Amino acid sequence: MHHFLRPRLSGVTLVTVFVYLAIIAVIEWQDAVGVPPGNTGVVSLSEAYRDLQAIAARPHPYNSRDNDAVHDFLINRLNAIVKGKSQIRVVDDLVSNATYRAGPALVYHESLNILVSIEGTEPSLDGVLFSAHFDSVSTAAGATDDGMGVATLLQLVTHFVEHPPHRRVVFNINNGEEDGLNGAHVYISEHPFANNIGTFLNLEGAGSGGRPLLFRSSNARVTRAFQNAPHPHGNTIAADGFKQGLIRSDTDYAVYEAFGWRGLDLAFYHPRSQYHTKYDSVANLGGAGSLWRMIETSLATADSLSSEGPTNKGDDAVVYFDVLGQTLVVFTLRTAFVINVILLVLGPPLVVVFAISWREWIRFPVTLLFAILASGALGYAYLKFNPFVSLFSKYHQYCLLFETIRAALFYFPILSCLVRRHIVLIENYVIWWLLLVLDTVLVNVYHIGALYLVNIFHAGTLLAVVLGLVETWLSKPGRGGDLVTEDVNDPSIDTCVIVEGHADGEGSTERTPLLEHRPPVVGLETDTGERQESTLCILQYLVSIPFPVLLIFQTALFAMHSLDQTLGDGASAAIVYGVALASSGLMVLPLAPFIHKIHGAVVIFVGVVFVTGALSNIFAFPFNSSAPLKVFFKQTVDLNNQTNSVILEGVSKYLRHPIIDEIPSSVNKAWCTDQSIRPLLYSCHWPGPVPNVVGEKYRASPDLSSLVKFTVKRDGSTAVFRIKGRNTRNCRIYFDTPIFYANVRGSTAGLQRGYEMGPEGVTVVKLWSRTWDREFVVDVGLGSSVLPSKKVSGRVACEWAENIDGRIPALEEAITFIPKWAVVTKADDGLVEAYHSFEI
């Protein structure tokens, strides 16, 4: 054992291979959903799975008859659950409505929410809200988004019926989230069940199965409720990603938090390329494992939130992360700041004491710069030649970038065995200290805690430096045994141990030749001294590498799960590869002080794998049915001239050729542009098969112009629009110039607090009704600057989202003929939009 522990070539190689392979194996193990237990305790997994099958049997967007069917199913299920319980109220909200501004649009929405209120044993305390939405998008059955969330809420209702909570609990099983968080807005707008709520748990889905992640949390207090989950999975980086716009999709969490409540956002998050597509189905989940993870996590969190004491104390921003899904580490940003400051102050004096006698500083920084340039070159090659390969194999990218940095550190001649382990440790520490300064600024000024890993790396490196101080002290003459000479050219000897200098007594300087032949040097030779040196070296390795690298690998996997498959949505490939490059660098940087001891045979083997893998990645086709490329569909109908246009949006490199070329109706008719509904994508247009969105009930009238009826009357700077669509409950008014006032007759309140009209006005009014074939009457203020003689133009439109009974043949054609490595999803709220132009 003594000979193995001594840091020789074989020992360091074996330890390194073991540590990194063990980390990969453990991360893979913890990322798997696993098989649900046979006994699920107070909840019924089989019942929840049957509920999920009923909810996600087919697409059921708000503007569909299948949505009504799911609504009725949920009402019946809840009534059966609470039957005979007078203290529990189930409310089918067919009364509430809300009007609010969302960016450039003004939204009017009528509620189809389902609410449940269960009184607690302490009615004086604030209540807890549990929320999920039961609508899906028009192109997905919604098993993950958000069928599993709704099925989980049904089990929570059952649980609290049998075990009354300490606090009052309210369930908002809302409708219309996919079209703009409408169900949450209408709930907080005027429903009495929104009174006296303090905290909330929102359940969501932005992938297709997997493990649910704590995406966001309002403060440390509510986050600690999540610590009670059996397998907590969360990372504050996700919350900061939302803040910085790296994660674009939003959830009802944003509405509740803006209203003043404090809560948690629990959501599935990968694989992102299957989000909002046909792959978001019960069959594609591969069993009930993901559903069980959502249920067990939500149940533990719900019990904690509903039983805790007063919730009006403390609102500190939070940093949190899980360790292998077994425990959740939670601390406030204030605590992070204090720890950072202490480490920033205490660390440098120790390093100065340790480093004062060493002068070989230039070798490692230059080598590290070379490694960064080499890995950056590989990342640039991916961006240039095959940016979407990250969808194909995220692990491959990490391995190759990791090996690029590691190989550069090993091969570059100025990092020879002459570079002492302690010097590189000190220089590593300087890097982490500078990054800790950056982290402290982000924490204190911008309230961003995403760089918490820097603190952990810094602490590990500082401990290794302190051990180096001990080793230096022990290596002094008279403290470790007899001093003899060692030959630095003997590969079995660790030539990077602390020694007193050359045999001639001179230390190295920047002028010392890099490949200078060294005479024997003074070192430790007795059994006692040798054991001290080898044991301390291994301790340095253990405190600075395994745990920090484990956390960065876990975080890197989460980050790539979140980001890699967003490229098809128009996200920046540079951001994705930047995250991969930074993560790979952090994985290998702690190894730098020991990297020269990796055996050459391992380096050659990995080098061959690297070259083969890099070439394979550059030339590999990046998509398959498991990681498909999304294309976004919409069909518009111009009712003025009875023409239609099919719009398909996607990444320009693949959209025109070969995807559009495979669709029969587009041949010799398609034209493409970089102007698209979704930013950063390319769009192609062509006249397609005419849609029949009205269904059998309306087939007697073939005239497309009858799809939307409207009138508009202008009186100076105001106008009144009357709009009615057939077989729909969703219409819109588009304006070519901003308007500054709009009111839907029948609305029961003004603009929602916090979502009032801004000085820039709006250019779209979105109208959502709970009933079919409703006529909307909208009063519009055109603005005081609009002269009576000035024309105001725009479009009046209605939308349809049901793809049943062959009603949208252009969509069916696209689904049928596009390559199997691509998948269709919706581009807008409606699959079909029919419009009249107006000028008043």
Image: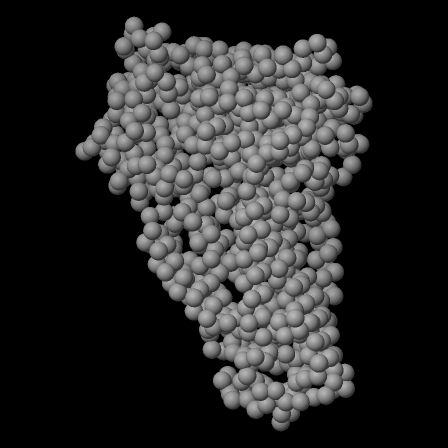
In the foreground, 5 or 617:
5
Q: Which residue is rendered at x = 70% and y = 63% of the image?
A: 344
Q: Which residue is rendered at x = 61% and y = 39% of the image?
A: 214
Q: Which residue is rendered at x = 73% and y = 10% of the image?
A: 86
Horizontal and vertical percent position of residue 780 = 47, 18
Residue 94, placed above or below residue 536: above
Asked whether residue 619 appears in the rendered view, the answer is yes
- Report how many numbered discs are placed on residues in the image: 0
Query: Outermost residue, left direction?
Result: 668
Q: Which residue is rendered at x = 61% and y = 50% of the image?
A: 450
User: Which quarter of the image is occupied by the C terminus?
Assistant: top left
Q: Is residue 147 found left or right of 832 in the rendered image?
A: right
Query: Outermost residue, front direction?
Result: 1
User: Which quarter of the image is occupied by the N terminus?
Assistant: bottom right
Residue 70, placed above or below residue 29: above
Query: Outermost residue, bottom direction?
Result: 504
Q: Is residue 458 found left or right of 62 in the rendered image?
A: right
Horizontal and vertical percent position of residue 553 = 56, 53
In the foreground, 773 or 1:
1
Horizontal and vertical percent position of residue 427 = 61, 71
Horizontal and vertical percent position of residue 835 = 35, 20
Q: Is residue 680 found left or right of 668 in the rendered image?
A: right
Report the coloring of the rendering. one colour
Q: Is residue 610 found left or right of 661 in the rendered image?
A: right
Asked whether residue 258 appears in the rendered view, the answer is no
- Asked where in the image residue 804 lies, by quadrant, the reply is top left
